[in-house]
Image (spheres, rainbow, N blue to C red):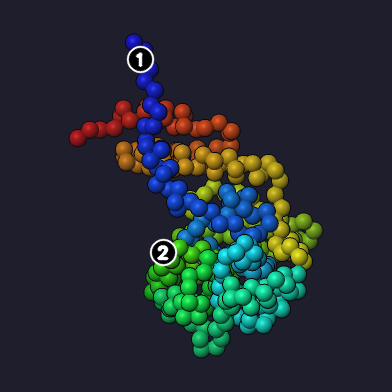
Amino acid sequence: MSDTHVHTDIYGINEYRSVNNAYETQVPTGIYGLDELIGGGFLKNTVNVVCGGTGTGKTTFGLQYALCGLNRGEKAVIISFEMSEKQIIKYANSLGWKEIENHVARGNLKIIQRFGEEMLIPPLEIQGLIRDEVGSVPDRIVLDPLTYIESFSASGRKSLSMIFQNLRETGTTVATLERPSDAWDGVPSYLADSVVLLENLGFGEMFDRTLRIIKTRGLGHGEGLYPYSIEGGAGIVVRASEKQKERVRLKNEYSIVFDAAMEEAEKLGLILLRERIAVLKDNWTKAEDPKLILDTLIESERKYVRKD
């Protein structure tokens, strides 16, 4: 008899896949060139923060994201603290997105503006605001900018966390926008499911504007600086090489395999192995399934687990 024993599913990968499939439904962002860098789009039921300075295209990002869904039969709401409905429609028209007026007229897009004393919104009122104004749960929500929800003190951050969680539980995909000057102090990155940074470097030519993906929870993502431009008719267009896109594709293709292995290592108390698998995941660019390698690592380390 051979001493070799083949483990076909030593850490429940098939069960892990089935449990997580419902959560990992992705929503196209509508930002040309971005989805290929984040594994296909935002995950459903997530809060995604876009940070950027004046003129980087935060409002364009939000509009483009909303219209992506609207043009595919979805419903969207834009809550703006700086622009009126008339101003938003005018800006969309300037980019060539004239269909926005039809979406508003048909009730598929609701634009809610809050000014002056109404700017500071207390905890949990966002959902009530949407329910009262829209009457139903939209597929996409844009908050522009997130700054005005309330001050981000320690208590404010707790409230913001509650708002984020309640929005996730509605089944609505959320895109939020934040000012850059206090972005890192104002919105701890751990509160968001993904963080995208837009920067205007002022170098001119190709790298005048760059996009950087800070995090995408549950998905692999590109880790470089990606030049982008804002084009009339198209909006934001992110440029990345085929090699850069392929690296992200391979990382995401086997992401769930790595995640299951890390979970198993943690269950076994193999914290150092879990960290090593995380590093392996970040650097995996091969076209082959990493499962055999992960099986070997876990089986080898399992022998040293102390049994009480």
* Residue 243, image x, y percentages: 68, 41
For the N terminus, the image quarter is: top left
Report which quarter residue 196 is drawn in: bottom right
Residue that numbered label 1 is attached to: 3
- For label 2, count other residues whose C-alpha is less than 10 Å away and answer few (under 14), some (14-19) or many (20+): few
Which of pointers 2 and 1 lies earlier in the amino acid sequence?
A: 1
Residue found at the far bottom of this picture: 117
* Residue 219, image x, y percentages: 52, 49
Instruction: Write the residue at 50% across / 58% down.
Output: 44
Residue that numbered label 2 is attached to: 169
Report which quarter residue 96 is drawn in: bottom right
Report which quarter residue 8 is drawn in: top left
Residue closest to the eye, 3 or 110: 110
Dot 2: element: helix
Residue found at the far right of this picture: 205
Q: Measured along the vertical axis of the image, is residue 152 above or below residue 228? A: below
**Can residue 298 be seen at all in this image of the molecule?**
no
Residue closest to the eye, 239 or 87: 87
Instruction: Write the residue at 38% across / 17% down.
Output: 4
